[in-house]
């Protein structure tokens, strides 16, 4: 596995919150991060049907355009009763002409489960794939996930996206009800980042 031995890293995202979160995680390793948005890089079209495929598209596009290593994140919710949907199209299910509406998207997910008379528990999981790519075309992939079940009605005002309908295994609260610090300690993104740090940033 290739170690990251530079000082500068591009976050292949135009999401300021995500860039801030990743920057905080990597700060102990002396890494300075900039976002694709800050560098004025175009957002590539995500044409793959897997989390790994789309994460690779974003990371390699940013690495090639900037000449620096780049880190991307592709994540989403997969519901067993829906054959793994919405999966890589998680954000698309929330799209409206006026922006993303995740309450609508969660209602759609639940309604589709109802249409199929899906048995309880309605098993689901959040996925997060991180891709760290270098300008020479090399990359490393880290896959994180958290298992859980869907609940209805929606519960909690914390978090974002599908958090109010997702209850992790072994927990009584949804991600929407959970203290954000606690959620971040067990989330799919935390799982993937732990693997990234152990593989490419932590001292051997």
Image (spheres, rainbow, N blue to C red):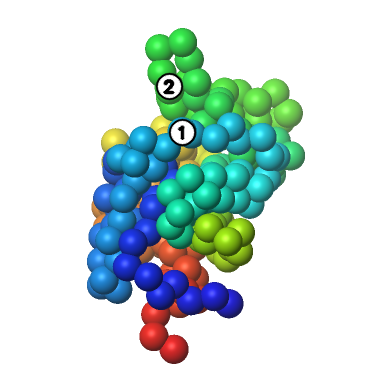
Asked if 195 appears above or below 151 in the picture, the reply is below
Q: Is 31 left, or right, of 126 in this rendering?
A: left
The residue sitting at 66% across, 35% down in the picture is: 47
- Residue 53 point in image, percent of width and height: 66, 47
Packing grade of label 2 (10 A; few <14, some 14-19, many >=20) is some
Tell me if I can see residue 182 in this picture.
no
Which element is circle 1 on?
loop
Per the image, the residue denoted by label 1 is: 42
- Residue 5 point in image, percent of width and height: 41, 75
Viewer-proximal residue among 95 and 204: 204
Quadrant where the C terminus is found in the figure: bottom left
- Residue 106 point in image, percent of width and height: 50, 29
Viewer-proximal residue among 201 and 82: 201
Packing grade of label 1 (10 A; few <14, some 14-19, many >=20) is some
Closer to the camera: disc 2 or disc 1?
A: 1
Most distant residue in the bottom direction: 204
């Amino acid at each position: 596995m290739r170690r990251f031995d530079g000082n500068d890293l591009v976050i292949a995202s135009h999401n300021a919150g995500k860039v801030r979160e990743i920057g905080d995680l990597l700060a102990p390793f002396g890494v300075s991060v900039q976002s694709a948005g800050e560098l004025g890089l175009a957002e590539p079209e995500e044409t793959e049907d897997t989390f790994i495929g789309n994460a690779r598209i974003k990371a390699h596009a940013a690495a090639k355009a900037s000449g620096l290593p780049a880190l991307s994140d592709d994540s989403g919710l997969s519901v067993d009763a829906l054959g793994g949907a919405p999966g890589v199209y998680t954000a698309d299910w929330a799209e409206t002409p006026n922006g993303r509406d995740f309450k609508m998207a969660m209602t759609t997910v639940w309604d589709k489960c109802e249409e199929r008379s899906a048995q309880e528990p309605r098993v689901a999981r959040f996925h997060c794939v991180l891709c760290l790519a270098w300008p020479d075309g090399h990359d490393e992939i880290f896959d994180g996930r958290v298992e859980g079940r869907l609940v209805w009605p929606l519960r909690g005002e914390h978090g974002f996206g599908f958090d109010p309908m997702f209850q992790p295994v072994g927990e009584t609260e949804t991600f929407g009800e959970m203290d954000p610090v606690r959620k971040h300690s067990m989330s799919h993104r935390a799982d993937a980042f732990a693997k990234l740090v152990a593989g490419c940033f932590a001292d051997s």
